[in-house]
Image (cartoon, rainbow, N blue to C red):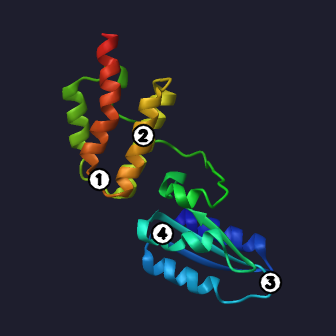
Amino acid sequence: MERFEEKSLEIEHTLLPLRSVRFICEDFKIEDAKEVIAEAYRSEENTKTLILGAKSFTIPAQNALLKILEEPPRNIVFILMAPNKSTFLPTVRSRMSLQVEQEGKKHEPISLVLRQLDISEMFRWVKEHDKLKKHEAKELIENLFHHAVYQEQYSLSVVQIEAFEKAFRLIELNGRTQSILIMVLMNFLKEAKRAR
């Protein structure tokens, strides 16, 4: 949250003397989307930038923004900020140009060895992480992906990559964290069994 505040102020400063309006919150909801749309239709002689930043954007809020992102009013520019691009629906991402900023993000260590994963270890680890909030679950999936690729140096299969992508979508749709983690880890469990 603090990061979005700082980044939005930095953007606002670089755009001076042009006007910017910031919409920074923890969870971007439909009410926030309505405020943004109302602000976008307030006419401006010069370019006005609307900066939206949040840890999560609800699906109704994103759907409400679709049309205005595709056809913004004259002199209106949008900048959307989120922890990662998977925060946004594919329909929103397709209407924006993406810029990924890595601030030397530190990934939390994962207490699993995927190459030696067995069913009891998998369920122990999943149970340990079953009470996460949506943004925490997304972060865990991201850390798990980072762990698989960079720590254990997996060359992920198409199925494994698709499982990570599906996990992000299911978390956004309020899927059960336990079920989502099991879905992702089952692909590693099969591989660990074959390696034995």
Eyeballing the image, is 113 above or below 74?
Answer: above
Residue under circle 2?
A: 164
Q: Nearer the viewer, mark 1 or mark 4?
A: 4
State the image coordinates of residue 108 (x, y, percent, origin top left): 43, 41
Q: Nearer the viewer, mark 4 or mark 3?
A: 4
Residue under circle 3?
A: 46
Task: State which tag comes first along the sequence, 1 or 2.
Answer: 2
Residue type at tag 4: Asn
Frontmost residue, 42 versus 106: 42
Eyeballing the image, is 4 above or below 106?
Answer: below
Q: Are marks 2 and 3 in contact (CB under 8 Å)?
A: no
Eyeballing the image, is 151 above or below 63?
Answer: above
Q: CA distance from mark 1 to mark 4?
A: 19 Å
Residue type at tag 3: Asn
> SS class of the residue under badge 4?
helix
Task: State which tag comes first along the sequence, 3 or 1.
Answer: 3
Residue type at tag 1: Gly
Mark identifier at residue 175: 1
Mark identifier at residue 63: 4
